[in-house]
Image (cartoon, helix red, strand yellow):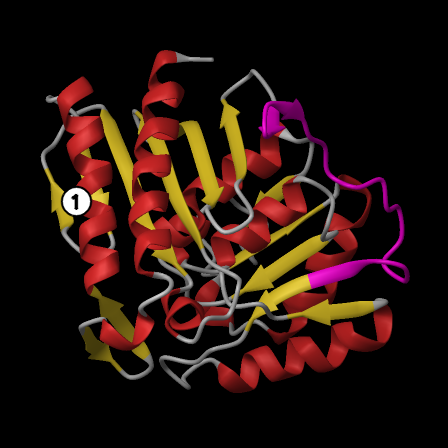
Amino acid sequence: MHPMLNTAVKAARRAGRVIMRYASQLDRLTVESKGRNDFVSQVDHEAEAEIIDVIHRAYPAHAFLGEETGRHGEGEFLWIIDPLDGTTNYLHGYAQYAVSIALYHQGKPSQAVVFDPLKNELYTASRGAGAQLNDRRMRVSGVSQLQPALLGTGFPFKSMENLDVWINTFRTLVPQVSGVRRAGSAALDLAHVACGRLDGFWEFGLNPWDMAAGCLLIEEAGGLVGDFCGGQSQLDSGHIVAATPKIYNELLALIQPHIPGSWCPRS
């Protein structure tokens, strides 16, 4: 295992211990609202602090972008962290949440970890070295057509600005596939695409920490990931589509007619 990936795994497991320690006392947690349907708890703060502490001790010159603490530092190495993706699920005792940690080197993904502490499932990837689930090689599914595909998604819930766009894509895709799931943790949904539990995924308005690790997991597991315009700006735009190679283009083609022109400006 790459030394930097090993550090990320250690940090993710430390955060996972924080998450599980509080899981049996949810009614005692201090919860704040960052905005409409956007919550943060003391678990988020403590888990992020644990992650940063582990990584900073190993790599004190590296920069961080955390959901709760924002960006700190500059340089060619940037750690992108979501200490608890699926906070609302967690606060309701709904078993779909994860720790997400990605390392970007000179603007490109290098290492990725998504850790599901409840199931003790560890998804990891290093650029050019493949992806693993609990140290066993994982691959995207072999689905070659949309009809039998199971897709994941996330609908707008903080801002209703893109709700109509999402509804139109949903209306188009539902008749074309075997099912659509909305579980509430984009990081874990992307990991599930990487290991073949889901065949594809699309969502609008995500943050970089929601998907930075998941993107590399999918690519290293043999899948494709990008934005709705056929490019690779998903971390900047917040709009993402991911799938197995044989259905990716068809999935993207069904989504694109519903995308506002302003999202894909022509140069």
Residues shaded magenta: 131-151
Q: Residue at x 75, y 77 (%)?
A: 172
Q: Position of residue 17 (x, y in %)?
A: 33, 44
Residue 7 horizontal side relative to residue 245, left or right: left
Residue 78 horizontal side relative to residue 135, left or right: left
The answer to whether residue 208 of the structure is visible from this angle is no
User: Magenta span has 60?
Assistant: no
Depth order, front residue of 131/200: 131
Q: Badge 1, how many Cα within 10 Å: few under 14, some, many 20+?
A: some
Does residue 216 lie above or below 68 as drawn? above
Q: Position of residue 177 (x, y in %)?
A: 84, 67
Q: Residue at x 38, y 20 (%)?
A: 6
Provide the residue designation for mark 1: 49
Does residue 58 lie above or below 15 as drawn? above
Depth order, front residue of 150/89: 89
Does residue 252 lie above or below 77 as drawn? below
Q: Count how many numbered circles sit on residues in the image.
A: 1
**Which secondary structure dominates the residues rendered in magenta?**
loop
Residue 251 horizontal side relative to residue 40, left or right: right
The answer to whether residue 247 of the structure is visible from this angle is yes
Secondary structure at badge 1 equals helix
Q: Amino acid at mark 1?
A: Ala
